[in-house]
């Protein structure tokens, strides 16, 4: 066995290897570790919400810094015997009845079951300056950032049909909302009327870039015409693409979200992917999930994985007993 082989204390294969150590992955690992499953979390250390000041919607923990949430989660998992290692998974293949996870640095871990919680990548519109302010003054979700940007001058970068709805949502938080019809947004008559009735301004023409003040905060939007319009916050609608490029050997591929906002893995109830031994939870399976929803899906997947392992273990034990020629009388009660 190589020095890069990651094995549990109880044997050569982990009950579950979790790929991704965000809210979904850690919640699943916590659920599994608390019922004494051997669980390994492999995490690349690239949380999607790292630029944000706080994670929101978490009962009793609203506004907790994202990295602090993960630190506490790792400690909880470890306290029940779960193991967390740093690494980027390069591939997964079947070997000797297990799923073998390989990392880019040469690490290997065999698992009876695999849970994918690798999250997603936010593909931002091609406007200079967006990435620099992403998660601070450039945001996408009222539930994640709305309270923090309330009553500011909010611009909405129009990039598709969903931008109209995004403008309506941010109008709940501020009376100063402007929709920039940047790229391919065509409003119908009823939509124009609704925006006008709500006092939402509409600016036609492409956006060329952002203006930043001497505090490195958003100051305005610069149009292709050269005109500058002051805004404090800019809402955008990225395309969400699940991180799943290492799964081709398992026959898993991304499917388009029904809204067209991104691509994700298709899963059944509990997170089963349809591929033997493989589950998924969090943003990799639902690009719309925020932190509380991702965490909940991880908990559900952990319970589903444990139920599957219980059934497998009970079946294997019965088969081994039968092979020895031992049977149990129906209805016998233990002494």
Image: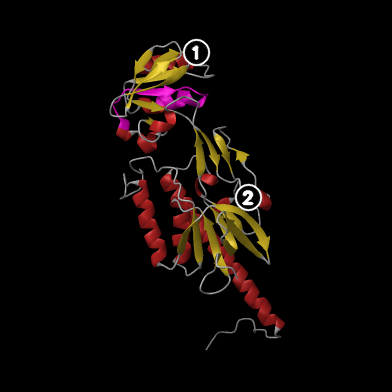
Per the image, is 92 magenta? no
Disc 2: which residue: 247
Residue 196 image point, x, y percent: 39, 14
Instruction: Quote the CA–CA distance across marks 1 and 2.
Output: 45 Å
For label 2, the crowd category at 10 Å Cα-Cα, with few meaning under 14, some 14 to 19 and many 20 or more, is: some
Element class at badge 1:
helix
Element class at badge 2:
loop
Q: Is residue 274 visible?
A: yes
Disc 1: which residue: 189
Per the image, is 150 magenta? yes
Residue 327 image point, x, y percent: 67, 84
The residue at 44%/18% (across/down) is 180
In terms of image quadrants, where is residue 312?
bottom right
For marks 1 and 2, the one nearer the N-term is 1
The residue at 63%/61% (across/down) is 99
Q: Residues in magenta?
A: 149-168
Q: Is residue 272 visible?
A: no
Residue 129 image point, x, y percent: 42, 27
> Viewed as shown, does residue 80 lie left or right of 119?
left
Residue 228 image point, x, y percent: 37, 14
> Viewed as shown, does residue 274 lie left or right of 201?
right
The one nearer the camera, 260 or 210, is: 210
């Amino acid at each position: 066995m190589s020095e890069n082989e990651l094995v549990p204390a109880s044997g050569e294969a982990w009950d579950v290897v979790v790929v991704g150590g965000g809210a979904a992955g850690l919640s699943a690992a916590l659920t599994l570790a608390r019922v004494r499953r051997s669980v390994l979390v492999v995490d690349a250390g690239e949380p999607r919400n790292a630029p944000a000041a706080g994670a929101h919607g978490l009962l009793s923990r609203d506004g907790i810094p994202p990295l602090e949430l993960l630190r506490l989660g790792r400690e909880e998992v470890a306290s029940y015997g779960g193991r967390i290692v740093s690494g980027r998974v390069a591939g997964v293949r079947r070997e000797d009845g297990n799923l073998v996870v390989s990392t880019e640095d040469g690490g290997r871990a065999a698992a009876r079951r695999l849970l994918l919680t690798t999250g997603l990548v936010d593909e931002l519109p091609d406007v200079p300056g967006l990435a620099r302010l992403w998660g601070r003054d450039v945001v996408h979700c009222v539930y994640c950032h709305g309270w923090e940007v309330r009553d500011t001058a909010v611009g909405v970068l129009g990039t598709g049909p969903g931008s109209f709805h995004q403008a309506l949502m941010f109008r709940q938080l501020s009376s100063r909302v402007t929709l920039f019809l940047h790229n391919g947004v065509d409003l119908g008559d009823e939509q124009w009327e609704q925006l006008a009735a709500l006092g939402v301004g509409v600016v036609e023409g492409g956006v060329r870039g952002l203006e930043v003040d001497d505090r490195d905060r958003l100051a305005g939007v610069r149009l292709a015409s050269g005109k500058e319009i002051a805004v404090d916050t800019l809402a955008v609608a990225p395309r969400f693409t699940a991180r799943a490029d290492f799964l081709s050997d398992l026959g898993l591929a991304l499917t388009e979200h029904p809204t067209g906002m991104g691509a994700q893995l298709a899963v059944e109830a509990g997170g089963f992917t349809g591929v033997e031994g493989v589950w998924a939870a969090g943003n990799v399976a639902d690009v719309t999930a925020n932190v509380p929803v991702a965490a909940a899906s991880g908990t559900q997947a952990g319970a589903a994985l444990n139920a599957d392992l219980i059934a497998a273990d009970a079946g294997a034990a019965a088969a081994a007993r039968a092979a020895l020629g031992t049977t149990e009388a129906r209805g016998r009660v233990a002494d």
